[in-house]
Image (spheres, rainbow, N blue to C red):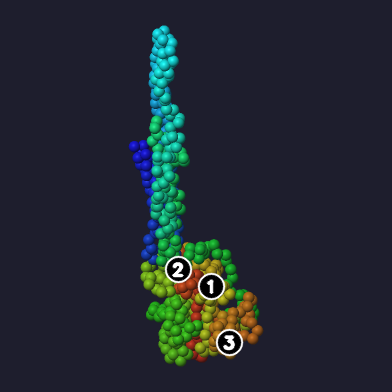
Amino acid sequence: MTRSRRMAAAVSALAVVAGGLVSAAVIGVGPALADHCDPAQASQEQQQGQRNRNNNRNQNQDQQQDQDQQGQDQNQQQQDQNQNQDQNGQNQGQNNNQDQNQQDQNQQDQNNNQQQNGQQQNNQQNGDQQQNADQQGQGGGRAVLDPAQNPDAQNPDAQNPDAQNPDPEQTAETFGRRNRPTRNPGQGNNGNNGNNGNNGNNGNGNASPTPSPTPSPTPSPTASEDHNECADLGPFVEDFVDIRRVAPRQLDARIGRGGSRGTFVSACGTNRNGHNNPDNFIVAPGVSNGAHHLHDYVGNLSTDGFSTDESLAAAGTTCRLGDKSTYFWPVLRDRKVDVNTEDADGNVGQVLRARSVTLQFRGNATSQVVAMPRFLRLITGDAKAATNGAGNARAAWSCTGFQNRISPDKYPLCPRGSQVVRILDFPSCWDGQNTDSANHRTHVVFPGQGGACPQGTKAVPALRMTLTYSVPQGPSFAVDAFPEQKHNPITDHADFANVMPDRLMQFVVSCINRGRRC
């Protein structure tokens, strides 16, 4: 009976440990996928998901500690019960031994008295019979077996097969490592039933069942398990800045006495006709989706990845005065709106049309300008500046009313009522010969710090695109980009090909050199 009770207690303790293992495997469920790709919302969901995972881990650890403590308490109680039972058994055995010894001693005293009486009677009757009576009296005593000489008591394992052949080890599935079971130590052996009471457990004493080591809780879901479909697209909250925190700076070089102060604006609209495609005939001619991001086009109505000088010259235009030039830039998107989510390049959200587009040709700070050759091709900025570095980057972000504050690498957070501004300045120092170059940059470069063109180049009208947008409040918009660029604001860029009639170009040069605003 005692052995059965100990076995039941050991099984109960193992059940507590197994319960702790199951609890350790419980993990928090990651947040649901976002319905849109709002950078602000994605950041909040990431932070909330991390907080949830931390809370789940803390709760699991607390629950595991409580269950481990409960198991230890039950094991201690079982040990105390075993000790009490063993002590009671030993006390009972000792008492039984003492009672038996007392009975034997009483019997021996009674025999001795009988022997003495017999001796006295025999002595009085016949001296010869006394020796026989003495021998007979001595033979009347009974030997008592000393409990200390009991062979079973000296060797408690002799009749306990469990002590020499312990139960086989039990196994338990571990939740910390997948498909790799962890060995769980076997239960302790119960003690034998002694002749005079219960002995303790075998040679190891009152050993309680040894619990299996507590496994490490299953790690929290990884980024792939707890993956927000927008989390890796960018931009990120750190890609935005309050425009009021941007230091003022001078964007243009001071115009000297020999400089050209005039301007010409080509009015081409804001792409109300919806001329968009992900092509770029300058950088990736003859390729569909060569840009991997959507462009807004104004001016020439035919521009796509397969445009040529001839096709551009034959097309119509949205510009006044017959300007058939093509002007294009990557669109800006509202990331709060759940559209374009299946885009393979990660350009998701609602396209924002520019509220205003100003295409202004300006002069040079130190010299007069000369006419651009027809079909001259120009690019500004670097669509891959996030990975290439800032060497060719020319992004300039601002807000209306704060245009002396220009951020080159962060999206501006504008006060209520202020619009986001993109300023895209093109190079304007031409080599005098080529309309394009292998890298689309060396045939026309930027003026130096003081505004003068490098030696061997000529100043041509400098194109500045100024685009304004009404965007949702907060960090919730992004420029289209190559996927690996993470919609970094430093990647802002634009393209231009001059398809003005020669007469119009001469008019532009005249306005600039004479200081007029046309």
Nearer to the camera, 102 or 448: 102
Q: Secondary structure at mark 1?
A: helix
Q: Secondary structure at mark 3?
A: loop
Label 3 vs label 2, nearer the camera: 2
The residue located at (41%, 15%) in the rendering is 133
The residue located at (39%, 54%) in the rendering is 173
Question: Sequence-wise, which precedes: disc 1 or disc 2?
Answer: 2
Label 1 vs label 3, nearer the camera: 1
Residue 224, compared with residue 514, is above or below; it is: above
Q: Secondary structure at mark 2?
A: loop
Q: Which residue is mark 2?
A: 233
Nearer to the camera, 501 or 203: 203
Circle 3: is it few (<14), some (14-19), or many (20+) Cα within 10 Å? many
Q: Specify the quadrant of the image occupied by residue 199.
A: top left
Query: Is residue 58 visible to us here?
Result: no
Q: Are marks 1 and 2 in contact (CB under 8 Å)?
A: no
Q: Which residue is mark 3?
A: 370
Question: Sequence-wise, which precedes: disc 3 or disc 2?
Answer: 2
The residue located at (61%, 85%) in the rendering is 458
Amino acid type at mark 2: Leu
Amino acid type at mark 3: Val
Nearer to the camera, 445 or 257: 445
Left or right: residue 246 compared with residue 212: right
Q: Which residue is mark 1?
A: 387
Circle 1: is it few (<14), some (14-19), or many (20+) Cα within 10 Å? few
